Image (tube, grey):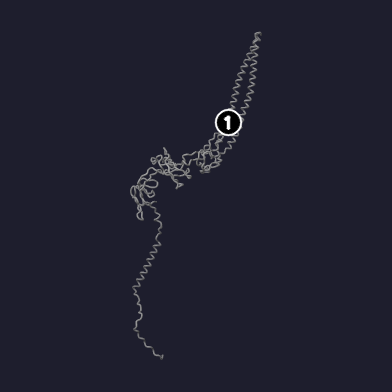
Amino acid sequence: MSAIPAAPPVPPMDHPGPKPVAAPPRKSRAWIGVLVLLAIIAGAVWGWRVMTKPAQPAVATAAIRTVKATVAPLDVTLRVAGQTTARNFANVTAPLLRGPESRGSLILLEVAKPGSFVRKGQVIVRIDAQSAQDHIDDLKDTLAAAENDIKKRIAEQKVEWETMQQTLRVAKSSYEKAKLDFSAAEVKVDLERELLKLTMDEAEKRYAEQQRDVATRKASQDAEIRILQLTLARHQRHMGRHTHDLERYTVKAPMDGLIVMATVFRGGDMAQIQQGDQVYPGQQILKVVDTRSMQVEGSVSQTDSGDLRVSQAARIGFDAFPEMHFTGKVYSIGALAVSGSRQNFFIRAIPVRVQIEGADPKLIPDLSAHANVLLETVQDQLQVPVGAVHEQNGKAWVELKRGVQFERREVTLGKRNNMAVAVTSGLTAGDEVRVM
């Protein structure tokens, strides 16, 4: 045991001090946990919806093109589709040769550049003429020989003629001597007188025969010379034909214009004629066209041809040059229908030509083009673009904008052209419709 006594207990003090904090009730803590849990669940659900929601294009509304129905004059047009051609042109063909030996193929030594402009009288085609030139040289020798034959025969005939004249003079002398001898027959006996008479008659007959022979021989000589002259003329005509052909082997432009080459079947494909090709007499080589006289050559259906009139105005466009436009007018309308397409021979069409007013370096033949012929202009027509109208089974409708949505609205259509169509009922001015 310890000798030190234990300390007595200390009594509690009466001065104020910090009061102990009471613990919160169990019920309040439970509600706080529930609220936190609900907030976590709600955030998870919102995040899941955001992540799984399909993405909407930001420009979906902007991609929808709309237009308002307007009241304006409407030009009723008829489209004539075709290609460009020239009213004024000249076909250049391989020459039709006169020479009987020049009936084969011709080789092009030189041709004008396709698409180039040429002047009247400018050389545009040269054909190989060496064989023709060689033949002409041979014909010149033949002509010289024929002329020499005539000269030779004339000289020979002069010798023959002088021989005949000498024979005739001898026969005449013999006849005159026999006549002179017979004149003295009175003093001769009968037998001598008879012999003299027979000699005179014989000489007379011989002289008459010689005269006839001279006339016959003269006609024969004239015929021989005429035959030789005809032979010479035949050779001259033959040479003239080849000389004419030789001149035509060089072809000059018959007019000012643009060179458009013809096409031939080469190597299994259609290709333009070029230098070195073989052509045949009468075959087209190229065409010289006047680009100041261009036109659109196409056709329209028989049902629409009744609306066309000569001199109707038209607006012309080109597939290759969308920015290029010309004005024009209907130049001619075909009187007879032709086959409209190869697929259906029984569908007939009327040929139409529309004159193009104006010129441009890009305006050349064989361009695909169209002409919108103005048939009439209707004033104060409520109209929308053609692309805004849907037609099926005889009904027409548009997609009318209502706020951010579109509703289908049936309409009644009137006259139209290639760009716009008149709406007679179903819309009012200012209505906004969707354009496809």
Q: Position of residue 326 (x, y in %)?
A: 44, 44
Q: Is residue 271 left or right of residue 390?
A: right
Q: Which residue, as the protein is rendered here, is positioned at the far bottom?
A: 3
**Res 353 → quadrant:** top left
Residue 236, can we see it? yes
Q: Please rate how many residues cluster around mark 1, counting C-alpha atoms within 10 Å: few if below 14, some from 14 to 19, many from 20.
A: some
Q: Amino acid at mark 1?
A: Gln
Q: Is residue 265 left or right of residue 148?
A: left
Q: Look at the image and tell me in which quarter the N terminus lies.
A: bottom left
The residue pinned by badge 1 equals 236
Numbered-mark total: 1
- Does dot 1 land on a helix, a strand or a loop? helix
Residue at (58% x, 31% y) in the render: 236
Q: Position of residue 272 (x, y in %)?
A: 52, 43
**Res 104 → quadrant:** top right
Q: Is residue 184 left or right of residue 67?
A: right
Give the answer, above or below, for where 82 lies relative to 165: below
Give the answer, above or below, for where 95 lies relative to 409: above
Q: Position of residue 181 (x, y in %)?
A: 65, 12
**Res 196 → quadrant:** top right
Residue 283, can we see it? no
Give the answer, above or below, for where 62 lies relative to 325: below
- Along the viewing direction, whichever of 23 and 310 lies nearer the viewer: 310
Q: Position of residue 11 (x, y in %)?
A: 35, 86
